[in-house]
């Protein structure tokens, strides 16, 4: 078969022949219809993701849409220690897959599920989110952040503060459900002050930034909070601004701050998969939307580093599935 193959963490994957994987146990060999190029896929392909063990060669891709031998289509999450999804064929474990409705677009599903899953699972599995609560999406101008705004609105958030650097994207988020936007551009201290004033009393923070942005944001919110004993659930999902923060100890004593992560390891695979059917239904119904850019898998090396319009996600479509 042909696949996108990473042979060096310093280079993009190349389209080349590779041995088809052999199913074991419950696994099924499926034809891949679509596989999204997510930030999680890039970090796995360059060896920087926290689950990377440094082994090469590898086929990137963490999820996708596949066609089973009986013709049915399914969205699936690849096994943690198995081959990736950016290939003409890969392995599907039925315990990590859900069937697709006939009217579901495989390219849209492959583009949307990974970024949407992060906030969907976080709000439904990591905390007991209730309709009427308010949410801050930190890093809202990225694909996952934009999806988080839509999902918070769908799940009944009374107020949604969207914060990010891209002013043009911020303006678009009001149409997706944001009740207030905050620019993180410019002087970092001034940005943190703006954020504190706008979002001090939210109930939940969905954080895709971490790093210096979060380091300033936590004290900014807590020092302006009207009732510091009111619980604030800070859900760490991404680290666009850096992998580390320095957190003053007083912050944890002076407010009811609960910091947690949401990602591989903090949730069981079964728990994640259980949320997928309802999320797929939202995309099929058009309740949630995503902008996908389909690209033939044969163009993976070029597309990997090519500029792409903000807000769109590349989805590779192997030729075998055409």
Image (spheres, rainbow, N blue to C red):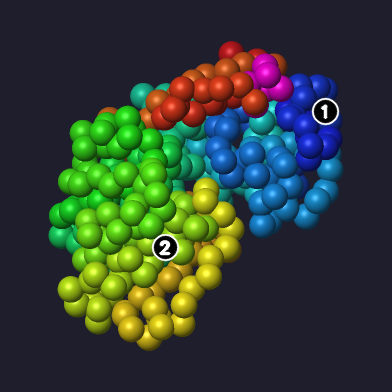
- Asked whether the beta carbons under mark 1 and mark 2 sit within 8 Å of each other, the answer is no
Task: Please identify the quarter of the rendering in which residue 57 is found.
Answer: top right
Q: Is residue 300 magenta?
A: yes
Q: Name the residue nearer the viewer: 48 or 212.
A: 212
Q: What element carries label 1?
A: loop
Location of the N terminus (image quadrant)? top right
Location of the C terminus (image quadrant)? top right
Residue for point 52% across, 23% down: 308
Whether residue 119 appears in this view of the structure is no
Within 10 Å of disc 1 (Cα), the crowding (few <14, some 14-19, many 20+) is some
Picture coordinates of residue 300, whole percent (x, y):
68, 22
Q: Is mark 2 on a helix, strand or loop?
A: helix
Q: Is residue 177 magenta?
A: no
Q: In this view, does 13 lie above or below 242?
A: above
Q: What stretch is highlighted in magenta?
A: 299-304
Q: Residue under circle 2?
A: 216
Picture coordinates of residue 312, whole percent (x, y):
45, 27
Residue for point 43% across, 37% down: 143
User: Magenta region, mostly helix, strand or loop?
Assistant: helix
Picture coordinates of residue 146, whole percent (x, y):
35, 40
Task: Locate residue 175 relative to residue 4 in the image: left or right.
Answer: left
Task: Please identify the quarter of the rendering in which residue 303 is found.
Answer: top right
Tell me, for residue 18, which label it has, or none: 1
């Amino acid at each position: 078969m042909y696949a996108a193959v990473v042979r060096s963490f310093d280079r993009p994957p190349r389209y080349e022949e590779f041995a088809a994987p052999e199913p074991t146990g419950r696994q099924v060999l499926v034809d891949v219809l679509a596989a999204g190029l997510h930030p999680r896929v890039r970090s796995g392909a360059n060896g920087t993701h926290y689950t990377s063990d440094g082994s090469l060669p590898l086929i990137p891709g963490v999820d996708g849409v596949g066609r089973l031998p009986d013709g049915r289509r399914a969205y699936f999450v690849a096994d943690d220690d198995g081959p990736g999804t950016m290939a003409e064929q890969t392995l599907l474990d039925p315990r990590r897959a859900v069937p697709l409705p006939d009217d579901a677009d495989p390219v849209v599903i492959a583009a949307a599920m990974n970024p949407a899953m992060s906030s969907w699972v976080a709000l439904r599995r990591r905390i007991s989110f209730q309709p009427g609560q308010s949410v801050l999406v930190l890093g809202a101008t990225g694909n996952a952040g934009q999806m988080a705004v839509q999902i918070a609105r769908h799940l009944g958030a009374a107020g949604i503060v969207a914060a990010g650097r891209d002013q043009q994207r911020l303006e678009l988020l009001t149409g997706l459900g944001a009740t207030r936007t905050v620019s993180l551009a410019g002087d970092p201290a001034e940005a943190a002050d703006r954020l504190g004033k706008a979002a001090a009393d939210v109930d939940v923070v969905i954080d895709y930034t971490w790093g210096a942005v979060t380091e300033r944001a936590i004290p900014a919110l807590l020092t302006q909070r009207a009732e510091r004993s009111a619980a604030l659930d800070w859900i760490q999902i991404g680290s666009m601004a850096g992998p580390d923060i320095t957190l003053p100890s007083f912050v944890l004593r002076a407010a009811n701050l609960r910091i947690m992560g949401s990602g591989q390891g903090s949730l069981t695979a079964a728990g994640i998969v259980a949320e997928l059917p309802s999320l797929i239904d939202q995309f099929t119904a058009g309740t949630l939307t995503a902008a996908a850019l389909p690209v033939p898998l044969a163009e993976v090396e070029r597309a990997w580093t090519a500029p792409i319009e903000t807000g769109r996600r590349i989805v590779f479509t192997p030729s075998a599935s055409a």
